Image (cartoon, coloured by chain):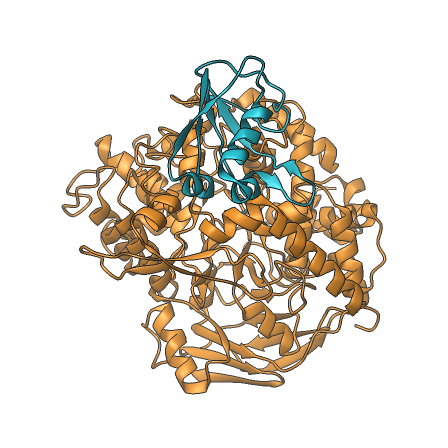
Chain colours: A cyan, B orange
Amino acid sequence: MFVYVKLYGGMSRLAKKDIVPIEIEKGYTLRDVLLKIIDIYGEEMKRELVDMRSNEFSPALILINNKSMPLTTNLDRKMSDGDKIALISFCAGG
Amino acid sequence: MKKYYGYAGKILRVNLTDKKITKEIISDETARKYIGGNGFGVKYLYDEVPAKIDPLGVENKLFIMTGPTEGTTVPGAGRACVITKSPLNNRFIDSYFGGHFGGEVKFAGYDGIIIEGKSTMPVYLIINDDDVKIEDASSIWGMTTIDAQKEVKKEIGEEYATLAIGIAGENLVPMACIISGVNAAGRGGTGAVMGSKNLKLIAVKGTNGVKVADIEGLNAYSLDVIARMKASPGMGRNLPAYGTTGSPKTNNDLGIFGTRNWQQEQFEDAGIISGPYFKDKLGYGDGSNTCLACPIACSQITKVKSGKFKDAITIGPEYETLFSLGSICGNGNIDYIVKGDQFCDELGLDTISAGVTIAFAMECFEKGILTLDDTEGIDLRFGNGDAIITLLEKIAKREGLGKILAYGTRKASEIIGKGSEDFAIHVKGLEVPAHSSRGLPGMAIGYATSNRGGSHQDGRATAERTGKIDRDVIVGKGKYNVEVQRMTTYCDCMILCRMTENAYGLWGITEDHINMLKLITGMDVTEEELVDAADRVYALERAFNIREGIESRETDVLPKRFMEEPIPEGPSKGKVITREILDLLLDEYYEERGWDKVTGYPTKETLERLNLEYVINDLYKEN
């Protein structure tokens, strides 16, 4: 089973692609998918996703199957085969 | 000022009519009640600028202010603000800009500069500590903002920080801005007010330091904030790498990216006008820049590599400009955006108001309300980059259709008529920037209740946009927005960059806010006292507008499109802020503020509680 993760900005630059397929097993959560991405791409990718002081995932509004939701309150959401996740990063300001 | 640190303690007042230059002491009481920056500015504006004067007349004044943070090590302290009565919408405006100007004002020994009166000939001002001179500017009048600053620096020294107006300001274009280096005090026509005084430029340098209450404590605090910023993906990775240029693609994917005059909120070329594409894939990145005392260095330098605009260069373009000269005009060609951004900086035009007004004209053209005769042959369909560049110049020179568009969407729609008022996208006469009202209800109520009008700097999109606050929830967003505005008002009094908001807090008065103020100034304040200070400043801005006769519950409203036309596509499809939703949020908002729900005025009791008794007679004359 695979989920397809769309990356932005620095994450996409690190992965050298905009969409990465991540193999999952039954029961995998969004947290498991993120940890797997960090595992694949290493410390630099972790810095794109995790607040290195608190060691927690940084708040973001993401899309799962084109529906927006907060990342941090959906970390335990179960993933299904074919899910499309957009890890939309955001900066303050603007 | 005797008790508090962090302030220079003086204001420089320059009267351009009689050339009188004075220095005035700021009292401890004023500092405690109004904090600085925006607070000082609105206090002076209310007290010194009479009601209903012509914003471009001799009675209007420019208040260029710093806050307690400027000149200190606090991250985000590299800014200053301009406060005046706006010629674009005749109300209070505060507009902020980065760079080194604010720091130099402080180092020269001033918390702010008041410009009043009017010179009979073009002049510029040189401030070198106590030495203040008014000089003949006839040789630089007519120059671009950039050339004028270069020319003066060549004469008096590179070490000066400068700000200047371009031909838009000289021509009194109501959306003209002030440019410091390449940073804009963009909104509300501050450049036209400067132009109305025949003041082309200000140069400042100083040799004084800024004494803070607890230098060891402040240094330790600043280092801790820097460490927090570096650890954060947003402030430590995204902003340094892309500034705000990544947001077109991300907001577009969420379906909250204003397109073709907000007829849509998804743009097919959003990816192309995003930093990760034009910086990384087109190779347009040409380094980065920073303001004083900033560990983030978000300013991206972008240079066109080939084609008709080869070597066009700009700082940014920021997210707002990628929207205003890009998606909102249906323009997916980054070269035109870079060129247009550079052009706006040179001419001294606000990119947001200019681009949004051009987008309005484009919709008029596509609907047949404006014809080729009206546009002098310009094919004003969405997506025509050449038309955008041509119109920017026409607006700055007030030529052709530019004569009408120079007034911004509200007045332009009143002149053009034929139903165009229905899609003139402004709040209270200030063009709405790039953050979606329909997709972010907290932002919507922020726009409706902004004292400036359509500004994203009173209400903020950040908490909803990062999922810290649920954007799908409506109830409670009125109260929430008051908390956001308390944060923005505090930061505008301290004058802290919005890029740091994730470090210091996205809403309410936080421990960081209290600590920072104490370490810099020595003020030992409670959270309640700081909430009151923020509420006092915001209520005084509101009172200024009420005294002008232009502010009430009726004016706390959104553009018709945002209230009647749901987002047509994408992940935010169907979202709309109806009149009923807006009324619900306004009721919540006024209740939290202690303002009257019928009139939208701060009640007498609230004004008394905030020690603003002296404005009661202005607001409640009939009683």
Residue B484 found in image quarter: top right
Question: Who is closer to the viewer here, B529 or B307?
Answer: B307
Q: Quadrant of the C terminus of chain B?
A: top right
| Residue B449 visible somewhere in the drawing | no
Q: Percent position (x, y) of residue B236? A: 57, 50
Question: Who is closer to the viewer here, B518 or B123?
Answer: B518
Question: Who is closer to the viewer here, B304 or B56?
Answer: B304
Whether B124 is drawn above or below B190: the answer is below
Question: Who is closer to the viewer here, B363 or B61?
Answer: B363
Whether B313 is drawn above or below B88: the answer is below
Residue B149 found in image quarter: bottom left
Whether B272 is drawn above or below B340: the answer is above
Q: Quadrant of the N terminus of chain B?
A: bottom right
| Residue B126 visible somewhere in the drawing | yes
How many discs mark residues in the rendered view? 0
Query: In the picture provided, is A43 more to the left or to the right than B289?
Result: right
Q: Percent position (x, y) of residue B150? A: 38, 77
Q: Percent position (x, y) of residue B136? A: 41, 84
Query: In the picture provided, is B336 more to the left or to the right than B467?
Result: left
The structure residue drawn at horizontal position 69% and vertical position 32%, both measured from the top left corner, is: B479
Q: Percent position (x, y) of residue B622? A: 70, 42
